[in-house]
């Protein structure tokens, strides 16, 4: 058979193929994790991702106890990847012992435990790699399309989704689409992960109607990403597209399909930016008249791209590309080398190194950008908006703890005393800098080692497979690479829906290439049960403390001070070293005017979290109320030293 012909196994079909119940369950489980976390604010809050972790780990524990998981012996890369991420989780747990805030570290451990559970589940629900890749790409892409569609609906008809209007009012840049993740760069990152997956489904799905459906979804997804006005999204998307096209099978077919999708996307983006109501997310009656025309445009464009893709699929089914457009591997390598040399020569001719130096100087400028001057002005800005300073503070703060860091989840306590300007940030806006600052070199090596292992496994699929399998491998590689790039300059690691997509795709790439007919070692199930129970404890512990504090705050706001005191005491009983619980107890005692008890609780808070300025400020007030003027002044000075740029102390 001609090597350039499309194999019968990968030709698109019109008939619907009914998947097996096991395939449906694996697909539904992966997609539901993405959709649930996405609709729950990206899973950012502790209660949301903790409950997801509990459900995931219970599935693993029960299945392992009954001998259902794992269904196949993991591959060597799978064992290495799982071992690295398990080691990263264990190092995070160990970091609590030297952390400058054990309460924050427990919460960070809960997040990492959730991620480990998703990775374990993703590795366990598939028998072999081809099946895992096919189902996971489809599941993650479906979840992203659903979230993107709802996000666009929230912009077209804000009154249908009240929570999106609340986020819009709270946002500094109302024009930037932030719902449902409540962060525009998070939405952009989600879209970037989905684009190569949809391109793979659009050009390599088994049935023609699935290809058409993926093609129809692409312009809508791109529109959603464009409405975020995310510069990071543009950069990461470019990385994803370059990697996908470079690695995919039958690039001419991909480029042809992509051209139609890009044309349709450009029409929708241009239409949205020329409609003030849609760009600004407004919902009054007069401005809603613009929505009708946009909806018609979306329907026509998506339908047009779907029909175009159906035609391309039929053409690919019955014809083979010209030999002139399908160079041999040797010729392709020569063309690649020549292209690289030409690009280098052009870059030197137009003085790219000097321009890069100028861009880096602009990036170090902390001046924030705004969309008030227009989308083009914002997207062309190269200001880092303080990122360089965040990274500098994180690196400098770890100079005395290079190996171990300051403790998980403590970056904010490192930033505020060293901030050259006021910016109340929680994260370093870089996964790698924050990991180094909080977990030291050891933690950074474990995490980067896992990322490299996952990327290597995805690239191996491209090298070892052909046809649709290679295209899906290219899509996974592109998505993982885009995530790694985006995580370098934003805090997407703290939005669990994004790492969940990354980890599910990584698990598919790390699955065994051939189904193993040998039963796993009996100790594997025992180990999974033991790890699962430990993970459940690590997740439930900070969740119980957080819930008790939240219940106390709710009861206090409702005027039920007795219940508030009871819940605050419960929180302290669960974790006496949680500063938030001690502060809540102090505030309740203050409402009872029991100032000695309030001071005692506040002093306990500053003893377990001495780097938190707000604890010292609360203690200062309570000491004054209890008649300790000198102690109050000392606490105030300590609070100011820990957050000298705060407007409170100016």
Image (cartoon, helix red, strand yellow):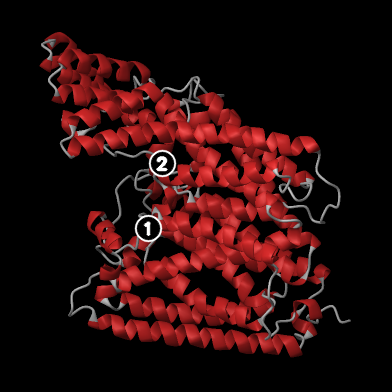
Residue that numbered label 2 is attached to: 46
Work out whether residue 381 or residue 71 is closer to the camera in this orientation and state it. Answer: 71
**Is residue 238 visible to us here?**
no
Question: Residue at horizontal 61%, vertical 37%?
Answer: 532
Q: Are marks 2 and 1 in contact (CB under 8 Å)?
A: no
Question: Residue at horizontal 78%, vertical 47%?
Answer: 75
**Is residue 285 visible to us here?**
yes
Work out whether residue 194 or residue 331 is closer to the camera in this orientation and state it. Answer: 194
Q: Tell me residue 39's x, y (percent).
A: 41, 58
Question: Residue at horizontal 78%, vertical 60%?
Answer: 463
Instruction: Count residues near mark 2 (Cα–Cα under 10 Å), then give few for <14, some for 14-19, many for 20+.
Output: some
The residue lying furthest to the right in this view is 1
**SS under mark 1:** helix
Residue 575 numbered mark, or none: none
**Would residue 434 appear left or right of 589 to someone viewing this image?**
right
Q: Tell me residue 514's x, y (percent).
A: 82, 56
Residue that numbered label 1 is attached to: 184
Instruction: Count residues near mark 1 (Cα–Cα under 10 Å), then give few for <14, some for 14-19, many for 20+.
Output: many
Q: Quadrant of residue 583?
A: top left
User: Which of the image's four quarters has the C terminus?
Assistant: top left
Image height of 203 relative to 82, above or below: below
Work out whether residue 581 or residue 99 is closer to the camera in this orientation and state it. Answer: 581
**SS under mark 2:** helix
Q: Tell me residue 405's x, y (percent).
A: 50, 26
- Precedes in sequence: disc 2 or disc 1: 2
Q: Quadrant of residue 616?
A: top left
Q: Quadrant of residue 298?
A: bottom left
Question: Residue at horizontal 61%, vertical 79%?
Answer: 211
**Would residue 128 appear left or right of 273 to someone viewing this image?**
right
**Spatial separation of the CA atoms under disc 2 and disc 1:** 20 Å
Image height of 232 relative to 244, above or below: above
Image height of 404 relative to 363, above or below: above
């Amino acid at each position: 058979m001609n090597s350039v012909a499309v194999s019968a196994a990968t030709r698109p079909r019109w008939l619907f193929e009914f998947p097996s119940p096991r395939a449906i369950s694996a697909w539904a489980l992966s997609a539901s994790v993405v959709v649930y976390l996405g609709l729950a604010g990206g899973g950012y809050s502790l209660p949301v991702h903790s409950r997801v972790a509990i459900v995931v780990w219970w599935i693993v524990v029960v299945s392992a106890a009954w001998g259902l998981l794992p269904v196949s012996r993991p591959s060597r890369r799978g064992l290495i990847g799982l071992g690295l991420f398990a080691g990263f989780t264990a190092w995070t747990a160990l970091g609590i012992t030297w952390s400058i805030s054990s309460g924050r570290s427990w919460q960070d451990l809960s997040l990492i435990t959730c991620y480990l559970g998703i990775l374990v589940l993703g590795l366990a629900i598939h028998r072999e790699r081809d099946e895992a890749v096919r189902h996971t790409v489809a599941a993650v892409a479906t979840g992203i399309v659903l979230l993107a569609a709802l996000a666009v609906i929230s912009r077209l008809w804000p009154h249908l989704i009240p929570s999106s209007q609340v986020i819009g009012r709270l946002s500094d840049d109302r024009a930037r689409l932030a719902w449902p993740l409540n962060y525009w760069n998070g939405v952009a990152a989600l879209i970037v992960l989905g684009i190569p997956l949809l391109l793979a489904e659009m050009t390599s799905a088994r049935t023609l109607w699935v290809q058409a459906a993926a093609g129809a979804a692409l312009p809508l997804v791109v529109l959603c990403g464009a409405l975020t006005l995310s510069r990071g999204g543009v950069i990461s998307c470019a990385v994803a597209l370059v990697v996908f096209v470079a690695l995919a099978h039958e690039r001419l077919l991909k480029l042809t399909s992509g051209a139609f999708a890009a044309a349709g996307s450009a029409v929708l983006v241009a239409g949205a930016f020329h409609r003030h109501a849609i760009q600004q997310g407004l919902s009054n009656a007069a401005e809603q008249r613009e929505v009708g025309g946009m909806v018609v445009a979306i329907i026509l464009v998506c339908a047009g791209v779907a029909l175009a893709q159906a035609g391309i699929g039929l053409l690919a089914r019955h014809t083979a590309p010209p030999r002139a457009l399908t160079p041999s591997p040797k010729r392709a390598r020569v063309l690649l080398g020549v292209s690289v040399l030409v690009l280098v020569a052009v870059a030197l001719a137009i003085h790219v190194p000097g321009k890069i130096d100028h861009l880096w100087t602009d990036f170090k400028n902390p001046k924030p950008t705004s969309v008030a001057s227009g989308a083009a002005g914002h997207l062309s800005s190269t200001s880092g908006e303080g990122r360089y300073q965040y990274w500098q503070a994180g690196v400098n703060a770890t100079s005395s703890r290079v190996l171990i860091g300051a403790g998980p989840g403590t970056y904010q306590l490192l930033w505020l005393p060293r901030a050259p300007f006021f910016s109340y940030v929680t994260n370093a806006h870089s996964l790698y800098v924050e990991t180094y600052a909080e977990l030291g070199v050891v933690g950074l090596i474990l995490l980067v080692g896992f990322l490299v292992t996952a990327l290597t496994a995805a690239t191996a699929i491209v090298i070892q497979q052909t046809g649709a399998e290679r295209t899906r491998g290219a899509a996974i590689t592109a998505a993982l690479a885009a995530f790694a790039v985006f995580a370098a300059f934003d805090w997407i690691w703290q939005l669990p829906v994004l790492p969940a997509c990354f980890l599910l795709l990584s698990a598919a790439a790390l699955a065994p290439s051939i189904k193993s007919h040998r039963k796993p070692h009996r100790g594997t199930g025992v180990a999974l049960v033991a790890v699962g129970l430990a993970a459940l404890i690590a997740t439930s512990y900070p969740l119980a403390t957080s819930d008790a504090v939240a219940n106390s705050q709710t009861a206090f706001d409702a005027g039920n001070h007795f219940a508030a005191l009871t819940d605050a005491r419960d929180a302290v009983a669960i974790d006496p070293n949680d500063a938030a619980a001690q502060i809540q107890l102090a505030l309740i005692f203050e409402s009872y005017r029991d100032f000695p008890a309030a001071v005692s609780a506040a002093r306990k808070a500053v003893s377990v979290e001495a780097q938190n300025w707000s604890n010292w400020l609360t203690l200062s007030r309570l000491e004054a109320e209890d008649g300790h003027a000198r102690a109050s002044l000392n606490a105030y000075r300590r609070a100011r030293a820990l957050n000298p740029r705060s407007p409170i102390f100016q």
